[in-house]
Structure formats: C-alpha cells, structure tokens
C-alpha cells in the first residue's frame, strides 16, 4: 500500500516504513507524531487507486519524527569586476527526518 501526500507544496510518494525529509515544523521534536491529511492518492496494490479531487476524503498518513537536522550549506556570491564589490552569504535549510508508521483510508 502506498500514498501520495502533499507537504509544503511538494508531492511525496510514501509507503509504510519509508523514511524521508520534510521542511521543519514548529513543535515537532524527535519521537513526536505528525499526521499528513492532504492525501492526493491511495493505492492498495490491487485494483484501481483512489484519486482525490483534490484530496481523498478521510484519508491520512501518520509519521514519526526521527530527528531534526540542517542540510548542507548553500552559498550565494555577488561580485562586480574591477569595483572591489564582493558579498558572500550562506544558508542551511532546517529539515525533519520522518518515518511513516501508518496509512489509513
């Protein structure tokens, strides 16, 4: 059984036991549970999948938060030749590592 959920403008295909990264949420700590209620599609593997318009009614995916971490640093550089103008800026995006514990239709 698998589902396609929407989170922070991205669509993610998940199955029970899968681990994936999502954007950081307030109040989410290691060991807590997150419920994804924006389910776009659910398939049991046999027969036709259930497709939502835009979301499947009453469907949800539960996931457990494993850890909070930051991605690798991304640097941005501004430069103008012969003017002595240089600017460096770095950013590390915070993420949550989660594991799917259950899919309910």
Image (tube, rainbow, N blue to C red):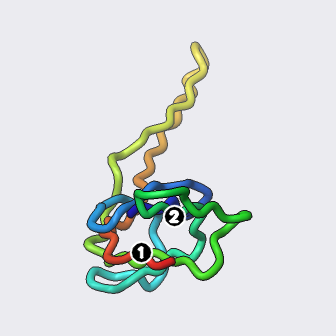
- Mark 1 packing: few (<14 Cα in 10 Å), some, or many (20+)? many
What residue is pinned by disc 2?
42
- Mark 2 packing: few (<14 Cα in 10 Å), some, or many (20+)? many
Q: Compared with residue 92, is residue 57 higher up or lower down, i.e. above or below?
A: below
Q: Which quadrant of the figure has residue 1? A: bottom left
Which residue is at 37% across, 84% downward?
33
Give the side of residue 61 with respect to residue 82, left or right: left
Q: Earlier in the sequence, mark 2 or mark 1?
A: 2
What residue is pinned by disc 1?
103
Q: Which mark is residue 90?
A: none
Q: Residue furthest right?
A: 53
Q: Compared with residue 49, is residue 24 higher up or lower down, i.e. above or below?
A: below
Q: Give the structural element (helix, strand or loop) at label 2.
A: strand
Q: Give the structural element (helix, strand or loop) at label 1.
A: strand
Of residues 27 and 46, the one nearer the viewer is 46
Which residue is at 49% across, 57% downward?
47
Q: How many badges with numbers are in the image?
A: 2
Which residue is at 27% across, 84% downward?
31
Which residue is at 37% across, 59% downward?
21
Q: Residue furthest top?
A: 82
Q: Position of residue 38 (x, y in %)?
A: 60, 71
Q: Position of residue 23 (x, y in %)?
A: 47, 63
Give the side of residue 37 with respect to residue 70, left or right: right
In three-dimensional space, the C-alpha distance between marks 2 and 1, rounded to whole angstroms, equals: 9 Å
Q: Position of residue 9 (x, y in %)?
A: 62, 57
Of residues 11 and 16, the one nearer the viewer is 16
Whether label 2 touches label 1, CB < 8 Å: yes
């Amino acid at each position: 059984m698998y589902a396609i959920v929407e989170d922070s403008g991205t669509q993610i295909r998940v199955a029970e036991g899968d681990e994936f990264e999502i954007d950081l949420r307030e109040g989410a700590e290691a060991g807590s549970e997150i419920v994804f209620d924006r389910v776009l599609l659910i398939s049991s593997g046999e027969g036709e999948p259930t497709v939502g318009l835009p979301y499947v009614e009453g469907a949800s995916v539960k996931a457990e938060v494993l850890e909070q971490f930051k991605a690798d640093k991304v640097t941005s550089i501004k430069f103008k030749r012969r003017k002595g103008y240089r600017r460096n800026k770095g950013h590390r995006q915070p993420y949550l590592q989660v594991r799917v514990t259950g899919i309910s239709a």
